[in-house]
Amino acid sequence: MVCHLREEKLWGNDDPLFPSTRVELGANRQFGVTGLDRAHWSSASPIRAIFREAFQRAGLPYFNPHCFRNTLVRLGQEVCKTPEEFKAWSQNLGHEKVLTTFLSYGEVARQRQGEILRGLAAPQKALPSGADEIAEAVFKRLRGTVNL
């Protein structure tokens, strides 16, 4: 679907991934489907129907589209190591503001919340700074070439 929209329809990042259906008055004076419109659907009902039918055909229980966003946000919370990385992740979900991602989808499960807080309470091993690592490397190098 994405390839078709990008390559055939020449749609960009601001165009909808699930575009609304273009309906026009036909030669028979009845409204009919004539293609895709660059507008978003006015409600989430059509995409829910598509998801429901796809899950039913696959013999799987239905999960709504936001379940997938929740899963992607949780994955982002695990793999992103910096605020900048999570901002990029958020933008990739189509959110202009990272707070949308945090407030709408980013709930931490209670069990995980407990794990995180227990981890914060445990003594942290100090990580060497970049300067410490450089000094250590220089010391080892000098020690290897000069008898002290």
Image (cartoon, grey):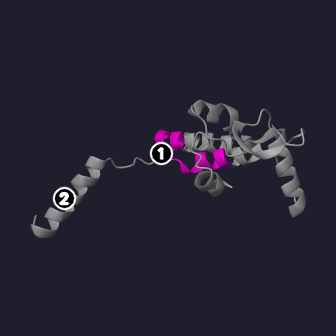
Which quarter of the rendered picture does the C terminus lie within? bottom left
- The amino acid type of the residue labelled 1 equals Gln
Does residue 95 appear to the left or right of 27 in the view shown?
left
Say which mark, if any, is on residue 139.
2
Residue type for callout 2: Phe
Q: For residue 75: magenta?
A: yes
User: Which circle's residue, 2 or 1, is located before the other in the chain?
Assistant: 1
Residue lying at 89% horizontally and 61% vertically, measured from the top left? 57
Residue 107 seen from this side? no
Most common SS among magenta residues: helix
Residue 18, position in %: x, y? 72, 45
Tell me, yes or no, if residue 54 can be seen here: yes
Who's the residue at 62% across and 55% down the image? 8
Which quarter of the rendering shows the N terminus? bottom right
Residue that carries the numbered disc 1 in the rendered image? 124
Residue 119, image x, y percentages: 58, 45
- First to last magenta residue range: 72-88
Q: Which of these two is toward me, 25 or 45? A: 25
Is residue 107 within the magenta segment?
A: no
Q: What is the secondary structure assignment of the residue under circle 1?
A: loop
Whole-percent x, y for residue 38 in the image: 67, 39
| In-front residue for pair 1/142 | 1
Using a 10 Å C-alpha cutoff, classify the residue at mark 2 as few (fewer than 14 neighbours), some (14 to 19) or many (20 or more).
few
Farthest residue to the front: give it. 27
Q: Is residue 67 left or right of residue 143?
A: right
